[in-house]
Image: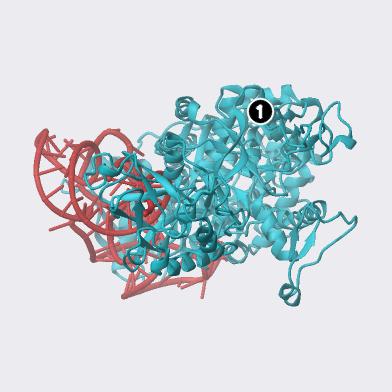
Amino acid sequence: MSESDSSGGPGGSGGPGRSGGQSGVIGADPSAPRALVRAIDPGKLPKYFDADEISARWDRFWQDEGVYHYDAARSRAETFVVDTPPPTASGSLHIGHVFSYTQADVVVRYKRMTGMNIFYPMGWDDNGLPTERRVQNYYHIRCDPNTPYEPGLRFEQASAADRKQPARLVSRPNFIEACFDLIREDEQAFSVLWHRLGLSVDWRQEYQTIDENCRRVAQRSFLDLWQKGHVYTSDAPTMWDIDFQCAVAQAEVEDKPVAGAFHQIEFAIEGESARIVIATTRPELLAACVGVTAHPNDERYKPFFGKRAITPLFRTPVPIFPSELADPEKGTGILMVCTFGDQTDVQWWRAEGLELRQVIGSDGRLRAVDFGKAPFASLDVARANAAYAEIAGKSVKQAQARIVELLRDPAGSATGTGAPLVREPEPIQHSVKFFEKGDRPLELLTTRQWFCRLLDRKADLIAKGEEVEWHPAHMRARFRDWTENLSIDWCLSRQRYFGVPIPVWYPLDANGRPDYDHPIVAEASALPVDPTTDLPRGHSEAQRGKPGGFVADPDIFDTWFTSSLTPQISSHWGTDPERHARLFPADVRPQGHDIFRTWAFYTIAKALLHENDVPWRHALISGWILDPDRKKMSKSKGNVMTPLPLIETYTADAARYWAASARLGADTAFDENVWKIGKRLVTKLFNAAKFVLSQPGEVAPITHELDRAFVAKLRELVEAATRNFDAYQYAHALQETETFFWTRFTDTYLELTKTRARGEGTGTATGREAALASQASGSAVAALRLGLSVLVRLFAPVLPFITEEIWSWAFAAEQGAGGSAARMSVHRAAWPGAADFRGTPPPSHPESFDVAIAALAAINKAKADAAVSMGREVASLTLQAAPATLGIFAGVRSDVLSAARVTRCEVEASAALAPGEFAVKAIEFADRPGGDT
RNA sequence: GGGGCGUUAGCUCAGUUGGUAGAGCACCGUGUUCACACCGCGGGGGUCACUGGUUCGAGUCCAGUACGCCCCACCA
């Protein structure tokens, strides 16, 4: 140990409390047990607790000294790899972020203290729709790929006046630049929160899902999937958002209840006088009708199977066929098949080989069509086109209204008998599929998209899901259920701009038509590429878009295509095989359950398809924050809490205390009270530490019965907390530690040892007596400091700021001596364990500590009943307890009596009392309130 | 319709292998001001949603019911 080490300790930059801590830091006796130190002059400790100053100072120290740096030189076995969720950079800061990120950080901090080398990166998920949408709103611009690029163009936040004008159209490169500008600001806001919260990430491992490495990894993933035959392109019905004008995957779809109506419409039957009435909620799709179906056993419709129905208005003959999928109970039992009203239409369309009559355009408006030309057909072309002219160009909603009007007119009838709409629409509430971020229902449009085959790998996916240890465990079932219920392959391509380009070109034939069956996929060595500006090998720019040349795929990947590679992004898959081997698979994936079916699922899928492995061994799923009415907090409900003001009020440690009080996976009602309790705990720790460290006695071996009994209890606590942390039950560990701290340490042990630790009453003692008293005092002082040292470390994962502050007063220098400043951090200290207790013999009676507390409590209760102060001196006392209990009491008697300020005490055996119980038979108080000792 | 989670004190939540119901807050009483009023001590308060079953014994295990929340499916 050298002085220079201790004087350069953490926080040496100044601030309250930094001036004096060093003089007594080094243990006076080199043979003293570790972590035991000489008293600190209380005058040199901070008088007040300044949370803001403390957290700013320690965040700076942690960053400057690299306390959380990953050490690439250490082995995989002693490394703990975290697959941190990259927050959506353009999302708003939400109290839920504090909740889930803290839970992960608590786990990480524990692992670090057990000696693990932590790999804990931070990424920003900035590619994708949320950024585009925010950029569009913020600058009031729209991307138009046909607009020419203007170098150096910069935008400012749009004013209210600007917003009254139409959005400015900008080129794709300008739009992407605007995205980059804005995400930088958004990422900064998150970064501030993470520092404020004390997330122990290694900021050297930062990435953006749009950065070069991420683009390379995502495109490499595509290449690998292509080479293995897992991806394919297909021109098929796909779920489509008409506002974003973009394809959507099954995982991004959610049902929303919508008001609709059943319309009953009469169809004629070719060559018969009979007619049928179909029920539909989408009459505007009548022009897209390609068939009619009913259940094969439905007697009402059996005679018509194989015949053709004729639609009203458009007079299109369509086949009537039986299908098990039709439900005789629903509507009229017979329905029209359209291209496409829903997923079942797609099945019928495929199974029956029906026509494709697509009437809805990519913008959600009715396309122009001609009933004189295939695939549109009519027995009365002029009339059909006239009817269609009424709806062409209209939105779905407008078209529906107009069609209903037309159907009320007998002129539109295909049967010649009255209006096709046989009764007034019957309003219903039904659920409709929406893109999760969309405002209008999805349509099924036939478009060319890239897909990743998943349906053929369900069994393997489920097997990988079984390999992952889910916390809480029931999330495993959720993974299995979602996987089993998958019904379509993963649609990878998006018709958007700010994302990773699909690294593909298509050859153009002599007529300038793309050959989608023979895509030119970029070469691995060329990645990342942008096919709209980069060239496929062996081609020249002059061939772009020319017959016989090539054309770029204009699309980008689904944002999850990149996000599902976060473990591989961190491991530098494909460019650094050694690093990849060290970091993949990861140990833990913390995440929320809102992105279970996307992020968790796709990440497992990618790891399976690429390396036939799991992406991580443990998945930690955080719960929701509910508002006090038990509704999920969300921006649209306007009940979102912003974290920073709360952190300012209660401190970052209190915020973390709140988050760490909830178990993994547990949805928790927001309760500000828990923050208050956290703040109270932080203050109490501050005060208790000051008190313990300012006890003047010199440390000595822990020999006293009460001290040994306390240490035994402390040891039990450490074992329990360690077990719980190992099982990711940080909330239990926190609760146990907190309970111990209040009920076994501050309120009890501190009170019981106060007098002895100060060595009071020994002022006149000499010789052997003085030596004994000094030994008794030193034993208490040593146990108090051991207790503080252990408790501070047990609390450190949850309360990193206050524990670091306390640690720096007394324990840091000893630990860090001879090493770097980083080693002095409590967060690099050894997790409490056997080494802390090695020097302390077990107590003579395991119950000594509880007996002492019970006796003190009995006397306190007698004081409370008499309405006198706890500090009131007791002139004489008669205590009763079971004989065995009295035997144990003898060993701790002097501590109890001095804590209770009892001058004279007699004990009586009482068989009526249970073991460990005390009763006060008689109590007599001193005349005056006792002077404080 | 299928699956999952939950229901314990006024509130927020613990309750690990079945063994006499816990904490904090709130409430009531009381004390105290050189570690701490962001305090101490004490007190009241629960048919553990309901019904059955297993067991010497069930908050805990099993079956069912009700209510709440979540996911999925259906949505002509």
Q: Give the left or right position of residue A932, taking residue A31 as reference.
A: left
From the rendered image, report the letter of the chain displayed in cyan. Answer: A
Whether residue A45 appears in this view of the structure is: no
Residue type at the position of mark 1: Leu
Q: Position of residue A350 (x, y in %)?
A: 46, 36
Helix, strand or loop at label 1? It is: helix
- Mark 1 nearby-residue class (10 Å; few <14, some 14–19, many ≥20): many
Placement of A15 over or under A596, stated as above or below:
below
Instruction: Chain letter for red, please.
Output: B
Residue A6 visible within the image = yes
Residue lying at 57% horizontally and 58% vertically, measured from the top left: A366
The number of numbered badges drawn on the structure is 1
Relative to A799, does residue A118 appear above or below in the rendering? above
Say which chain tag 1 marks.
A
Q: Up-down: is A595 above or below A565?
A: below
Camera-side residue: A129 or A848?
A129
Q: Position of residue A69 (x, y in %)?
A: 72, 37
Residue in the foreground of this view, choosing between A933 and A89: A89
Give A400 or A557, whichever is nearer the viewer: A400
Please give the residue where the numbered disc 1 appears in the rendered image.
Answer: A583
Say above or below: A402 vs A25: below
Identify the image quadrant of residue A214: top right
The color scheme shown is by chain
